[in-house]
């Protein structure tokens, strides 16, 4: 799931980005309201984490603009100010939750998960299913044939990508950039190893193999016809 962070303090922004990535989210970070608004309007983020005090356009203005333009993504406000009127203002403008700095990452993550579970539009699926393989984005849980499969955060991200784009051959370069935030010219062996491990967990012991290698092209997840 994709999260956009708008935070002008580099330290806080980087800390949040890293933590949320480690928790398995795809994260985009910007340090000003104008760019934040633009990215939010263009993108398909599941959540916006929005600092209130920003240079130029502040968090409230970003949210007002978003709502005015009909963008209904959930918003979690961050603020250093613990003022009742600030909270009321944010909630009146349509924020979903409010977190006062300083906060612990564990608390932020709990709030993020609660908001995502609650959803806003209810149009975005939170589970993916291919044949008897199920992936629950909120509970971070994978099952095959009803049996629970434990994955690392990277394996989960890799499987999520393959399942979202099932039937599509995904080149290693795309997997590298989407799941590892790295370029293709880095060590691509990382991806082969990860796919091999993921395949062992997903396909070993099952008659139908879901993850296929397309030689010279990449990987695809689909229900195989024969097997
Ligand atoms: Ca700030």
Image (cartoon, rainbow, N blue to C red):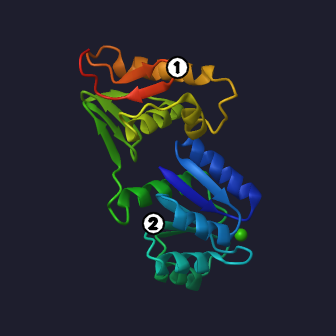
Dividing the image into 4 quarters, which one contains the C terminus?
top left
Please tell me in which quadrant of the rendered image residue 117 appears. bottom left
Which is closer to the viewer, label 2 or label 1? 1
Residue at position x 71%, y 57% in the image: 12
Picture coordinates of residue 177 (x, y %)?
A: 60, 38
Taking the image as shown, residue 69 lies to the left or right of residue 189, namely: left
Q: Identify the residue position indicated by label 2 in the image.
A: 73
Q: Is residue 201 visible in this depiction of the protein?
A: yes
State the SS at label 1. Answer: loop
Ligand 1: which quarter? Answer: bottom right
User: Closer to the camera, 162 or 12?
Assistant: 162
**As drawn, 216 above or below 84:** above
Please tell me in which quadrant of the rendered image residue 133 appears. top left
Picture coordinates of residue 6 (x, y %)?
A: 64, 64
Residue at position x 66%, y 72% in the image: 34
Number of callouts? 2
The label on residue 216 is 1
Q: Residues within 10 Å of mark 2 (few under 14, many from 20)?
A: many
User: Closer to the camera, 77 or 104?
Assistant: 77
Dot 2 and dot 1 residues touching (CB under 8 Å): no
Picture coordinates of residue 73 (x, y %)?
A: 45, 66
State which tag comes first along the sequence, 2 or 1. 2
Please tell me in which quadrant of the rendered image residue 30 appears. bottom right
Picture coordinates of residue 28 (x, y %)?
A: 61, 54
**As drawn, 51 above or below 163:** below
The label on residue 93 is none
**Is the residue at mark 1 in contact range of ligand 1, meaning its CB lies under 8 Å from it?**
no
């Amino acid at each position: 799931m994709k999260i956009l962070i708008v935070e002008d303090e580099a330290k806080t922004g980087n800390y949040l980005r890293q933590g949320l990535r480690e928790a398995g989210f795809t994260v985009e970070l910007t340090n000003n309201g104008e760019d934040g608004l633009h990215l939010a309007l263009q993108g398909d983020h599941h959540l916006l984490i929005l600092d209130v005090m920003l240079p130029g356009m502040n968090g409230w203005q970003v949210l007002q603009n978003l709502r005015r333009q009909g963008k209904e993504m959930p918003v979690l406000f961050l603020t250093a100010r613990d003022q009742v009127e600030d909270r009321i203002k944010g909630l009146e403008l349509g924020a979903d939750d409010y977190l006062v700095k300083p906060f612990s990452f564990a608390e932020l993550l709990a709030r993020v998960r609660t908001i995502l579970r609650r959803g806003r539009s209810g149009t975005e699926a939170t589970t993916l299913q291919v044949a008897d393989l199920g992936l629950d984005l909120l509970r971070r849980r994978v099952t095959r044939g009803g049996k629970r499969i434990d994955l690392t955060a990277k394996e989960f991200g890799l499987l999520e990508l393959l399942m979202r784009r099932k039937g599509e051959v995904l080149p290693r370069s795309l997997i590298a950039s989407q799941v590892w935030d790295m370029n293709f010219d880095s060590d691509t062996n990382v991806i082969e190893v990860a796919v091999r491990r993921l395949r062992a967990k997903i396909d070993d012991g099952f008659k139908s193999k879901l993850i296929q290698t397309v030689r010279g092209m990449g990987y695809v997840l689909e229900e195989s016809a024969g097997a």
